[in-house]
Amino acid sequence: MDTHLPKLARALESAVEGMSNEQLRWHPPGKWCATEVLEHLYLTYNGTIKGFERLLDSGKPTATSPSTKQRWRTLVVIGLGYVPTGRKAPSVTEPRGLSSETVRTELGTKIAAMDTIIEQCESRFGRGIPLLDHPILGPLSATQWRKFHLLHGMHHRKQLLRLRNALENH
């Protein structure tokens, strides 16, 4: 069993453990609050679930051939584990105002659902083959999708910890 996504759920939960809803909504000027960071992640997990549901419905992998740029991006992110900072989130993953309670209580459920559907697709279509395109990285296998979400989530966990630290010094 792959441990990337359960590890991610624990890491995100621990980053906001004990924070009140008011603390989750605090942010420095021009930055996202913890709730918005969690909502962004929630939306990325929801998008991945929908993509893999469409994959199951289609009955075959829908991954395309990667461009040279996508190969490099995948090498940097998945291969080297480097998630660049300062990129604007795709509009479909920008926070829309979900409540702190919703994102906090449902994030772990979304991660578990994502893990389950990725596993179903991997079992059905094969391990190590590109299954579905990521909007920036291009075609990824199930293992690469799990690793991407772990790396992306840990990138945002650092933001959550910085917010938590700023609150303590605020």
Image (tube, grey):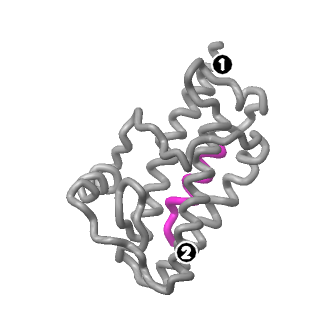
Q: Nearer the viewer, mark 2 or mark 1?
A: 2
| Tag 1 secondary structure | helix
Residue 8 lies within the magenta run: yes
Q: Which mark is residue 168?
A: 1
Q: Which residue is mark 2?
A: 54
Quarter of the image with the C terminus is top right
- Residue depicted at 64% across the width and 66% down the height: 113
Instruction: Residue at the far top: name it.
Output: 170
Q: Nearer the viewer, residue 67 or 10?
A: 67
- Residue depicted at 34% across the width and 51% down the height: 77
**Is 110 situated left or right of 4 in this image?**
right
Question: In this picture, is 64 found above or below 157?
Answer: below
| Tag 2 secondary structure | helix
Q: Main secondary structure of the magenta part?
A: helix
Question: In this picture, is 3 found above or below 72?
Answer: below
- Residue depicted at 53% across the width and 71% down the height: 52
Q: Nearer the viewer, residue 4 or 129?
A: 129
Q: Please identify the quarter of the rendering in which residue 33 is found.
A: top right
Q: Which mark is residue 114?
A: none
